[in-house]
Image (cartoon, grey):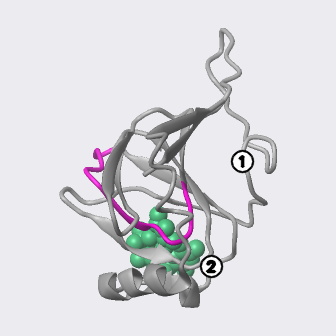
Amino acid sequence: MQVIKYVFQPHGDARGQLVALEEFKDIPFRIKRVYYMYDTADGVTRGYHAHKSLQQILVCIHGSCKIRLDNGKEKKVIPLEKPYEGLYISYAMWREMFDFSIDAVLMVLASELYDESDYIRNYDEFLEYIKDSGDNTAADGDKNDESTFC
Ligand code: T46
C-alpha cells in the first residue's frame, strides 16, 4: 500500500510558524469542505468507514493521533504528530482514527461537501465494493511504500 504524506512549507520567523494551504498547489484537489475534531475522549476510535469518491488530507494541527488505513488487502498505521504534515486518503480506503492525545486537533480538508451516501460504513460492504468496482487505486502502489511530497 502506498502511503502519501505531504510535508507543507512552514513560513517561520522570530514570531513563530505559519502554514498556508492552497488548493491545487499544496493540496491536490479543490477544497470544498474543512472540518476538525477535538476533545476526543480517551481510548476512542473514530471512522470505521470508507468513501466512494471523497479524497481528503488529514492534518493533526495540535497534539497527535494515529490513522489506520486499510485497502482491503493490507493495513497500515500512520502516526500524525506534526502540524506541517498531511496524510492523503483516497476514496475506497477504510480508515480508523485512534490514539488521540488529549490536546489533539485533527483537521480534515475534503474534496467534496458532506454527503452521507458517499460513506461505506460496513466493512463487508467495503470489501464487496472494492471487488465489484475493480478499482485498485487504493490498493496499488505496492512498489513504493511511502511517498512524501513537499
Ligand atoms: C472521515 C473521517 C476522517 C457533518 O454534519 N458534516 C461533516 O462534514 C462531517 C464530517 C460530519 N458531520 C456529522 C455527521 C455525524 O453526525 O458529524 C457527526 C460525526 O461524523 P462521523 O461519525 O462521520 O465522524 P468520523 O470522525 O467517524 O469521520 C469523519 C468523517 O465523517 C469522514 O468522512 O473520513 O472523519
Instruction: Judge left or right: residue 48 versus residue 105.
Output: left
The correct choice, above or below, for 10 with respect to 128 in the image is above
Taking depth in this image into account, of 9 and 136 the one nearest to the observer is: 136
- Residue 86 lies in the magenta-colored region: no
Q: Mark 2 falls on what kind of element?
A: loop
Position in image of residue 15 (x %, y %): 65, 15
Q: Which residues are magenta?
A: 89-103
Dot 2 alpha-carbon crowd within 10 angstroms: few under 14, some 14 to 19, many 20 or more: few
Judge whether residue 121 can be spotted in this image: no
Position in image of residue 140 (x %, y %): 50, 57
Q: Quadrant of residue 18?
A: top right
| Residue plotted at (56% across, 62% down) | 90
Residue that label 1 marks: 27
How far apart are labels 1 and 2 at the CA level?
18 Å
CB atoms of marks 1 and 2 within 8 Å: no
Judge whether residue 111 can be spotted in this image: yes
| Residue plotted at (39% across, 65% down) | 95
| Residue plotted at (63% across, 23% down) | 17
| Amino acid at dot 2 | Tyr
Dot 1 alpha-carbon crowd within 10 angstroms: few under 14, some 14 to 19, many 20 or more: some
Residue that label 2 marks: 114
Q: Mark 1 falls on what kind of element?
A: loop
Taking depth in this image into account, of 96 and 137 the one nearest to the observer is: 137
Position in image of residue 106 (x %, y %): 46, 51
**Main structural element of the magenta stretch: helix, strand or loop?**
loop
| Amino acid at dot 1 | Ile
Q: Quadrant of residue 112?
A: bottom right
Mark 2 C-beta closer than 8 Å to ligand 1: yes
Q: Residue furthest left?
A: 43
